[in-house]
Structures are given as structure tokens and as C-alpha cells.
């Protein structure tokens, strides 16, 4: 299929190339099932790749933490105790960070001051510009 498309691309002008490629693809896959399968395959394979990457990132981070703790001279039991943190502890840390970051902003006094304008006349409220006048 790719060889056929390559031959057409070498022998035709731009408009003819596009038309011939469309014809070849239509002849090979008239309903479009192949295109749908290829598209879904690309999407699912990229999702699988992202899952594998995110799953292994935590392992790499834990490995790095273990190496740093071993350099400090801690035993294997202490290392495992520091690495294995429960969900409750993670939730408490997250809530503490949220509360701390939300209190960083200082509270300002919101005092509204309305100053009266010395000119009270405004053409917006003038009656002479109304539409009830008969035009001349």
C-alpha cells in the first residue's frame, strides 16, 4: 500500500497526487474500518505507553530516595518505614499544604469611597435629547 502511494506521489502533480491517494485509500478501504482500527490502535497504544511511564516514575523516585537514605546510613527497616507512607498521611500533608497556601495572601480592608461630583448635570439624563421632539 505504501509503495503504491509512493509511486503515485512521484509521478503526479499536487492536485493529482491528492486525488490519486484518495482513490487508492478508497479502493483499499471503502468503508473506513481500517482507518478506524488504525486510529483506535494509535490512541490505545499511546494510553498504554503513558500508563507504563507513570507507573514506573514512582518506582524511580522510590529508588532514588532509597539511595539517598542509604548514603545517610539508615538501616533497611528505617528506609522502608520512610518510603511506605499511608494514604491518610498523604491526605493530611495535602490538606496542611492547602491550608498553608490559602493563608499566604493577606486580607485587605475593602472600604468603598464614593466621592460626589461637583457637576450634577449630565447629558445622559437630559430631557431635551429625548425622541419625542418632532424633527424639522
Image (tube, helix red, strand yellow):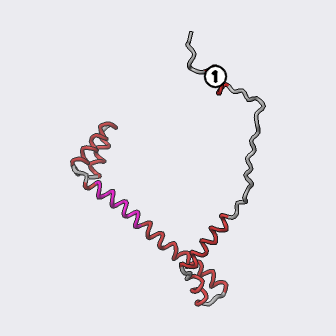
> Image check: 76 left or right of 2?
right
Q: Which residue is mark 1?
A: 127
Is the magenta region chiefly helix, strand or loop? helix
Say few, some or many: other residues with alpha carbon within 10 Å of mark 1 (under 14 / 14 to 19 / 20 or more).
few
The answer to which image quadrant residue 67 occupies is bottom right
Relative to 22, residue 123 above or below? above
Q: Residue at x 61, y 74 (%)?
A: 93
The answer to which image quadrant residue 132 occupies is top right
Give residue 86's position: percent from left, percent from top: 54, 81
The total number of labels drawn is 1
Relative to 60, residue 110 above or below? above
Magenta residue check for 17: no
Magenta stretch, residue numbers: 35-48
> Image check: 69 left or right of 86?
right
Give residue 22's position: percent from left, percent from top: 27, 44
Quadrant containing the C terminus in the rendered view: top right
Magenta residue check for 45: yes
3 or 38: which is nearer to us? 38
Q: Residue at x 55, y 13 (%)?
A: 134
Q: Residue at x 29, y 48 (%)?
A: 5
Amino acid at each position: 500500500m505504501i509503495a503504491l502511494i509512493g509511486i503515485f506521489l512521484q509521478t503526479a502533480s499536487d492536485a493529482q497526487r491528492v486525488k490519486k491517494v484518495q482513490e487508492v485509500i478508497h479502493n483499499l478501504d471503502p468503508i473506513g474500518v481500517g482507518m478506524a482500527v488504525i486510529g483506535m490502535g494509535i490512541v490505545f497504544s499511546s494510553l498504554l505507553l503513558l500508563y507504563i511511564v507513570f507507573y514506573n516514575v514512582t518506582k524511580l523516585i522510590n529508588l532514588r530516595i532509597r539511595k539517598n537514605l542509604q548514603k545517610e546510613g539508615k538501616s533497611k527497616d528505617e528506609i522502608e518505614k520512610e518510603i511506605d507512607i499511608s494514604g491518610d498521611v498523604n491526605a493530611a500533608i495535602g490538606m496542611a499544604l492547602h491550608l498553608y497556601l490559602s493563608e499566604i495572601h493577606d486580607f485587605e480592608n475593602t472600604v468603598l469611597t464614593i466621592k460626589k461630583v461637583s457637576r450634577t448635570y449630565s447629558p445622559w439624563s437630559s430631557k431635551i435629547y429625548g425622541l419625542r421632539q418632532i424633527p424639522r
